[in-house]
């Protein structure tokens, strides 16, 4: 890992969603505690876990305090709506916000690096930091990296391609307000949706080619990045069955309903 840089001064609200994540949750929580940027608080929305997830969270809450760790109950409508229930909630306030999965491990400089990209821009403009991940097995042994996307981070690209997982995303208060205005939408994934919104309104997307997250690849991953032959066959089968067309249709339908919020040029692109 690269030498740590001086942590910027700003509070980050980490938004984590859990569901039967006891197997790896401790490691993720410990990686948050090890961040070089220490000004953060964690809000966890549990979607009805039946394993030891809530017991683990309550244990950390007793150690960290309720101000540091808040535990909520999710809407039980899947991971996307669980994340949207947090980021669209106007009662959750802060300077910056970060999505967090239950089974990853953050490198120590993850928040520091993200804030270095985000701070200094116009705070009235939506800004989104995202990037690549390091694929690891259950035991955290490295097994690859997510693709390096080279196309410009534009709305035109966002309509057809999601370039980064939510587990890498950190965003500013203007982006949070944008999510609140649009509200929870019936879209396939919160990360692709956020990329569409920020690029669609003319915000700034900061794509980092240097990974800051260890992304576990295991059978229970909701959205995996496995590059194996089996995984590629599975994706091809999904394409043939129309799954990706359905996802695109959901995104476009949600954008059309609120297209007045998009920039003029991007409304034209959406119409095309």
Image (spheres, grey):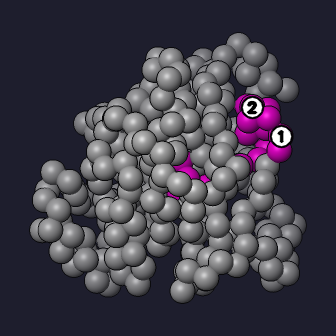
Position of 39 compared to 110: left or right? Answer: left
Q: Write the residue at 39% across / 75% down.
A: 27
- Using a 10 Å C-alpha cutoff, classify the residue at mark 2 as few (fewer than 14 neighbours), some (14 to 19) or many (20 or more): some
User: Horizontal and vertical percent for residue 226?
Assistant: 72, 74
Q: Which residue shows up at 75% across the image and 31% down it?
A: 154
Query: Magenta segment: does it hold 226?
Result: no
- Of residue 12 and residue 92, the one placed in the foreground of this image is 12
| Quadrant occupied by the N terminus | bottom right
Q: Residue at image x 47%, y 38%?
A: 115
**Residue 178 rendering spot, x and y as whole percentages:** 47, 28
Image position of 3 (left or right of 94): right
In the depicted view, which residue is nearer to us: 140 or 270? 140
Question: Mark 2 — residue?
Answer: 154
Residue reaching furthest top? 264
Residue 255 seen from this side: no
The total number of labels drawn is 2
Query: Residue 246 vs residue 18: left or right?
Result: right
Residue in view at x 60 percent, y 31 percent? 198
Q: Residue furthest front?
A: 3
Residue labelled with disc 1: 151
Which secondary structure, mark 1?
A: loop
Q: CA distance from mark 1 to mark 2?
A: 8 Å
Percent across and percent down for residue 61 are: 17, 65
Image quadrant assignment for residue 56: bottom left
Which span of residues is magenta-colored?
150-171
1 and 2 marks in contact (CB < 8 Å)? yes
Asked if the magenta segment contains residue 154, the reply would be yes
Image quarter in which the C terminus is found? top right
Q: Residues within 10 Å of mark 1 (few under 14, many from 20)?
A: few
Which mark, residue 215?
none
């Amino acid at each position: 890992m690269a030498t740590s840089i001086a942590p910027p001064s700003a509070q980050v609200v980490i938004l984590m969603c859990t569901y039967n994540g006891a197997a790896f949750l401790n490691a993720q929580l410990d990686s948050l505690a090890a961040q070089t940027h220490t000004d953060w608080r964690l809000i966890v929305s549990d979607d009805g876990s039946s394993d030891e997830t809530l017991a683990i969270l309550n244990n950390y809450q007793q150690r960290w305090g309720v101000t540091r760790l808040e535990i909520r109950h999710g809407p039980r409508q899947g991971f996307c709506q669980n994340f949207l229930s947090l980021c669209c909630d106007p009662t959750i306030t802060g300077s910056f916000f970060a999505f967090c999965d239950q089974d990853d491990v953050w490198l120590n400089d993850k928040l520091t690096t993200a804030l270095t990209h985000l701070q200094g821009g116009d705070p009235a403009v939506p800004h989104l930091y995202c990037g690549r991940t390091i694929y690891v097995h259950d035991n955290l042994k490295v097994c690859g990296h997510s693709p390096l996307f080279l196309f410009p981070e534009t709305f035109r690209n966002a309509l057809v391609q999601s370039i980064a997982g939510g587990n890498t995303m950190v965003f500013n208060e203007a982006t949070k307000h944008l999510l609140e205005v649009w509200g929870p939408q019936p879209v396939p994934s919160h990360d692709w949706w956020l990329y569409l919104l920020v690029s669609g309104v003319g915000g700034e997307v900061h794509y980092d080619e240097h990974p800051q997250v260890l992304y576990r690849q295991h059978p229970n991953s909701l959205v995996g990045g496995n590059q194996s032959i089996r995984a590629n066959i599975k994706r091809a089968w999904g394409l043939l069955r129309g799954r990706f067309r359905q996802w695109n249709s959901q995104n476009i339908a949600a954008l059309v309903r609120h297209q007045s919020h998009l920039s003029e040029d991007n409304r034209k692109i959406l119409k095309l």
